Amino acid sequence: MKNLSGAKLTERAAFDILLGSILVLGFTALILFITGAPVLAAFQNIWLGAFASTTKMSQVLSVWIPLILCACGLLYTFKVNLWNIGIEGQIIMGAIFAMAALRVPGIESPLLRLFLAFLTSLLGGGIWGLLAGLLKTRGGVHEIFGGLGLNFVAQGFVLWLIFGPWKRPGIASMSGTELLGRELWLSTPPGWRMATAGLIIAISVIIITWLLLEKSHLGLNLRAVGQNPRAALLYRISPENYYLQSISIAGACAGLAGFLQVTAVYHRLIPSISSGYGYLALLVVLLAGYRIMLLPFLALFFASLNVGAVQLPIVLQLDSSLSGVIQGCCVLCALFILGIRQRRRQS
Amino acid sequence: MIGDLSIPVLIASVLTASAPLIIIALGETLTEKSGVINLSLDGVVLFSAMAAFVIARQTDSLLLGFLAGGCAGMFTGLIVGYFSIYLHLTQVAVGFALSLLCRDLAYFLGNPYSRVQGPTLLATKLPFYDSLPNSLQVVLTQPPTVWIALLLIFLFYCFFSFSKAGLSLRSVGENPAASFARGLNPGRIQMTAVLAGAFLVGLGGAAYSLSLKPGWGRPQGAEGIGWIALALVIFGGWHPIRVALGAMLFAFLQVSGIGLQNLFPGVPAQVFQTAPFPLMIFTLVLMHFSTGNTRKQDYSENKTQGFAGKLFLSRAPKALGKNYKQE
């Protein structure tokens, strides 16, 4: 690899991207063809659904924000080789904690309430992440199963709140709790569906993550633990400690996503408050090959697919899960190309 | 008695509900015994459930439906196997991506068949049904999937404990390099195990849409089952009988949840539906503590076993999740 010139590397990357796109488009077209759906119209509708107007573009950004927050969080855990599947539950707990802070009686200033909700969402997500970490380090439960268990607990908890203590006066329904007062909505520019504060938070988190992972001691130690926990131990770097730190930070990032889902998107707590963004973020990070520079672009691509596919059921009577098919296929194709490359290099 | 359920009804419900889960978990046990983790189960169960229902409806044949479910599972097994055994990619990454892809593919392709009628595998009476006491009649009136699941437990136990093929499979899962030196072909054995395991997962998925929760829709009702099956394999310590018992325990938690719902009307039904999942996974924690090994599990191999530890004694196949590169 090292003796390849820059031009050749770019050429190879371009070839890989081309091959990947052909594979993904080919597979999706085949799937559409099997269902008898018009292939071109489906692609066109996804495109129009995401980019036809500024409102739609702002909606893409409103998906991009939680996606990028979760993806940044996952970078920390991937650095130490942890699979933080519990990220869905961490988003939910962030949302619950934020909602709890917003419901605290006696605080007059909406700004103070929102700030409190911001802080508690960090705490809620962080604690939920820490729990999954403790289950791994102290309980010996693989993080995938500990995380999943906590996801189900968080899901049960949010349902209990919506149908129990926080139910709307008189009726309890799957549509969620009562709407928050307008003063507690994060402000959105007129005609847009995305809060400015959300965008600022997301960009700040990207920058902080880059600084911490690439330029700080924490990033170095996390990498050391990820590469070889036994060797790290010899250098007095406690793997357990860094497992817990990384998964708590990841949880806090996901918790922020929960805060924004409540205060900027739904303005209430709903059963599916996490909207599957945690799992989607795992795919984004895998596709990016754990590189932070690629995250914003790939998250934008995934967000536009998600938003664009919403109108498929209305216009073409197709299920909106087509976006998930394309996303999953992208990751598998990327892995396939990576595998083929590695194999070629070895032989 | 739990809620309104009498004991025979409870046993019958547990047997019915656990059958597909047993088939899926045993399939994964087979795969993992060879050293490969197939993490895609959750999506594959839905994908095969969809494929089975669609084919069974189109052909009006339950047998073809089950076969289609199995083949759908095997097809995904082929991807997992090829990516991990021949391309040496991270098994967890491939499995996770495939899991989400299969789930969405199932929803997308199955959309036109949402909430329509299709053939259903019903409970059958045994030949000597009339001579049995009433409570046994209740317990033993089961769909054929239950008998297949019970037979599979026995076959798996014999396969791993007494057969030469089972020994080869286990040796590959423990140490592929040594197995290769002894004249085995680890790649081929692993691939066979992955394909056969995935076929069973597909059959289990088919049992959901054709028998336990007949029909197709979004959600189908088998969501999360694949993850539980993966946890059950650990819970059962890669031993077929204990894996099956774990599946029955999970089914018991699910069924008793329905019973308890009537006892506690104040708690929303959705909470009872999600409860068995964390309960099952947190049983893993209890098991871990009972082995007396509470710290430094990943980078220290010193293990002390207490009494309870011996009871639950289990160890993952040594090469599990590690890709073997033939020299």
Image (spheres, coloured by chain):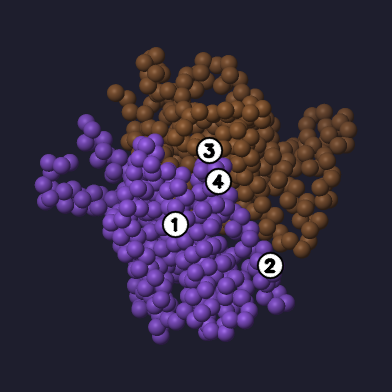
Chain colours: A purple, B brown
**x and y percentages locating residue A268 in the rendered image:** 57, 74
Kind of residue at disc 3:
Arg
In the rendered view, would you say B299 is above or below A326?
Answer: above
| Badge nearest the viewer, 2 or 4 | 4
Height in image: B246 above or below B273? above
**Image quadrant assignment for residue A103:** bottom right
**Circle count:** 4
Dots 3 and 4 on the same chain: no
Tag 2: Cα neighbours inside 10 Å, few (<14), some, or many (≥20)? many
Q: Residue at x 35, y 40 (%)?
A: A235
Choose between B100 and B115: the one closer to the eye: B100
Measured in 3D between alpha carbons, the distance from the residue under mark 1 to the one under mark 4, in whole angstroms, is: 16 Å
Where does label 4 land, which residue? A135
The circle drawn on residue A163 is 2
Q: Image quarter for residue B36? A: top left
The amino acid beneath tag 2 is Phe
The subunit letter for the residue under badge 3 reads: B
Of the image marks 1 and 4, the number of the one nearer the N terminus: 4
Measure the C-alpha gap from mark 3 to mark 4: 11 Å
Dot 3 corresponds to which residue? Answer: B295
Q: What amino acid is labelled 1 in the image?
A: Ala
What residue is at 17 percent from the left and 41 percent from the top?
A: A1
Same chain assignment for discs 1 and 4: yes
- Residue A250 - label: 1
Whether labels 2 and 1 share one chain = yes
Closer-to-camera residue (A237/B65): A237
Q: Is residue B280 left or right of residue B142?
A: left
Tell us which disc is closer to us: 2 or 1. 1
SS label for mark 3? loop
- Is residue A119 something one can see in this rendering? yes
